[in-house]
Image (cartoon, rainbow, N blue to C red):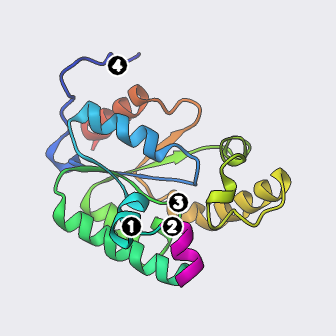
């Protein structure tokens, strides 16, 4: 069954007026998040873009100048600020966001969290051309190195991702599929 889009935004239950997307880099969190925000009539934020806006430098520059520890603390601070100031939002998180500083607990207790699961082979295909612009992937020599790093990263993060109450696996993770997941979640919860 396919949900048809209309020009009227779909309504989310009040308890889901914060929808968080988590998953690996390249999973499509930002792309799907923008579409969900339009469909639900909610503002959209990308957490990495919000950090860049506030820091006035790229994520790569932050990593190079300050290191990952600084970035992860800044990410946690900005996440908490976004949650405190946005009662209604679709938020695409960074791939590592749920894994540090109890960020996942913040996501799980303040909104509805969706894990976008994408096979590593597909992530490699999506990220190969842009890996050099991603701080944790930039130094990898080739597709094989990228695949190895993504497998290791996913293995370390999986226990966090698996705590999300909603799960959508590629390639079936379309806007319509996610809307159906959300609707089912609230009719069976």
Find out whether residue 179 is within the magenta segment: no
Which residue sits at x=76%, y=56%? 146
Q: Quadrant of residue 102?
A: bottom left
Tag 2, which secondary structure? helix
Which residue sits at x=32%, y=40%? 185
Which callout, 2 or 3, points to the residue nearer the camera?
A: 2
Query: Does 175 appear above or below 100?
Result: above
Comes first in the chain, label 2 or label 3: 2
Tell me, yes or no, if residue 37 can be seen here: yes
Which callout, 2 or 4, points to the residue nearer the camera?
A: 2
For disc 4, the marked residue is 3
For disc 1, the marked residue is 51
Q: Observer-nearest residue: 18 or 105?
A: 18
**Taking 72 as reference, is 152 left or right?**
right
Labelled disc at residue 115:
none
Comes first in the chain, label 2 or label 4: 4
**Taking 174 as reference, is 152 left or right?**
right
Comes first in the chain, label 1 or label 2: 1
Query: Does 137 appear above or below 38?
Result: below
Which residue sits at x=43%, y=38%? 32
Q: Observer-nearest residue: 14 or 5?
A: 5
Tell me, yes or no, if residue 67 can be seen here: no
**Taking 41 as reference, is 181 left or right?**
right
Q: CA distance from mark 2 to mark 4?
A: 37 Å
Which callout, 1 or 4, points to the residue nearer the camera?
A: 1
Q: CA distance from mark 1 to mark 2?
A: 8 Å
Q: Which residues are magenta?
A: 58-66
């Amino acid at each position: 069954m396919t949900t048809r889009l209309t020009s009227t935004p779909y309504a989310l239950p009040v308890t889901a007026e914060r929808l968080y997307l988590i998953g690996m880099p390249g999973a499509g969190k930002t792309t799907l998040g923008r579409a969900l925000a339009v469909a639900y009539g909610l503002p959209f934020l990308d957490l990495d873009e919000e950090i860049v806006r506030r820091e006035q430098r790229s994520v790569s520059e932050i990593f190079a100048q300050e290191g990952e520890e600084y970035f992860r603390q800044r990410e946690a601070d900005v996440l908490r600020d976004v949650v405190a100031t946005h009662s209604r939002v679709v938020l695409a998180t960074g791939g590592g966001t749920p894994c540090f500083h109890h960020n996942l607990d913040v996501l799980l207790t303040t909104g509805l969290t969706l894990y976008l699961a994408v096979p590593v082979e597909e992530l490699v295909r999506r990220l190969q051309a842009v890996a050099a612009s991603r701080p944790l992937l930039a130094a990898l020599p080739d597709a094989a190195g990228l695949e190895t790093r993504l497998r290791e990263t996913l293995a370390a993060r999986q226990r966090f991702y698996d705590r999300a109450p909603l799960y959508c696996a590629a390639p079936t993770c379309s806007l319509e599929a996610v809307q159906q997941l959300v609707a089912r979640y609230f009719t069976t919860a």
